[in-house]
Image (cartoon, rainbow, N blue to C red):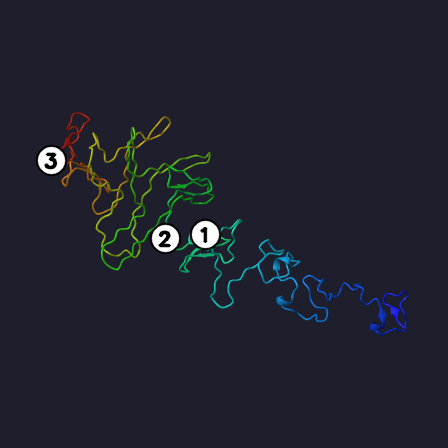
Amino acid sequence: MSFAHQSTPPCAGVTVHGLLDGLDVDDHEQYALADKSRPDPWVAAADLTPRSLADLGTKAHDLLTGLDADDHSIYALLAGRSGGQTFVGGAAASEHLTLQSTAHATRGYVRAQDDLQLLSNIMRDSGGNARVTLAAASPHVALTGDLDVSGNIAAGSRAAVNSGRIVNAQSTISAVQAVALYADIISSVASGNTLAMGLAGGASVQGTPTMGWAYGLYFFAKHDTPSACYSVIPVYLAMQSGVAGTGALSFATGITISPAAWGGSKPATSKGVDVHQQGGVGVGTAYGYKATDQTATTVRLLELGPAVPYLRLGGGANPAANQSHLSLKFGATLKLLTEGAADSGGAGYRQVIVPN
């Protein structure tokens, strides 16, 4: 006696599977068929332990199903993975992750499509030296090493790259002291001579312009506010000696104009100092030149000419009675001008006397 495999209702009391009818009917899709028609790739129904690729009915990887499933988290997913991905180069200390554009000898580029954020805040050169350090707080960018810029530089909130300016510094700063460019150089050597210059350079005109002008130093100071402004000083210079400057100091000069060097054309007129109009309508008092009295063992407010000058103006204190601080050169002799007695030049006048 046998019972149908698919009898309805189930036949109670039959517990031996082999006594059922319809055992050759494929009504158990969860099992693999012995003829290897299901599944594809096929796994033998009698042995469901893991098999090698050699046991598969389909060995071609591209014929497998589910290839688009992200079920290998150990691999980088080129199309992107939800939550982001982290690529780790090595597993031991001081190992690296190297990205290369191409295997070809002619290299391409390693491109970053979007903004690049360095979590370490450090960029290093090929020798491992830290060259660029970034920070969220000021200073935001710190450079270590030499900097060679072949183009032009714009610095400041109002600056833009200007082809006519190697460095274009323009900004609006709210500060007690606002400085566009500050230079403070210390030359420290153990022996030999040294020269320290806070600002040095030159300007030359070349090519074939219709007319050219060359200014080695050009500054202006402007009052441009409805508030009071105490002074405008285009050039402000100061000489100093630090507390550690105890060595001998030969001389100090606020402004020195070195001898001119005319290797080519010679100017029709050359002026060491040329003071133009400093007054104007509404100006109270205008000075072309003003020197404050000096305190020293010997004071020379003005001296013109060679070693024995043509004119000398002393100072430091009021001159003695009937004396002056003005000396003029007569022939080869410098003589101090004095005044004569009352009415020596006529009633109400005095003579200017040049001593013998």
Please state which of the two labelled residues, at mark 1 or mark 2, is closer to the viewer. Answer: 2
Task: Say which residue appears at 37% left-offset and 39% top-offset.
Answer: 165
The secondary structure type at the circle numbered 2 is loop
* Residue bearing mark 2: 146
- Specify the quadrant that holds the N terminus: bottom right
Task: Say which residue appears at 66% left-offset and 63% top-offset.
Answer: 57
Other-residue count near label 1 (Cα within 10 Å), few / some / many at <14 / 14–19 / ≥20: few
- Specify the quadrant that holds the C terminus: top left
Dot 3 or dot 1, earlier in sequence: 1
Callout 2 amino acid: Asp
Q: Which mark is residue 187?
A: none
Q: Provide residue 238's location: percent of width, then percent of height.
A: 31, 45
Task: Say which residue appears at 47% left-offset and 54% top-offset.
Answer: 102
Is residue 74 toward the left or the right of residue 265 in the image?
right
C-alpha distance separating marks 3 and 1: 71 Å
Dot 3 or dot 2, earlier in sequence: 2
C-alpha distance separating marks 3 and 2: 66 Å
Callout 3 amino acid: Pro
Task: Say which residue appears at 40% left-offset and 55% top-offset.
Answer: 144
Is residue 273 toward the left or the right of residue 50 in the image?
left
Other-residue count near label 2 (Cα within 10 Å), few / some / many at <14 / 14–19 / ≥20: few
In the figure, 346 relative to 231: above or below? Answer: above
Q: Which mark is residue 355?
A: 3
* Residue bearing mark 1: 141
Task: Tell me whether circle 1 and circle 2 mark residues in contact (CB < 8 Å).
Answer: no
The foreground one among 111 and 13 is: 13
Q: Provide residue 320's location: percent of width, then percent of height.
A: 19, 40
Is residue 183 toward the left or the right of residue 192 in the image?
right
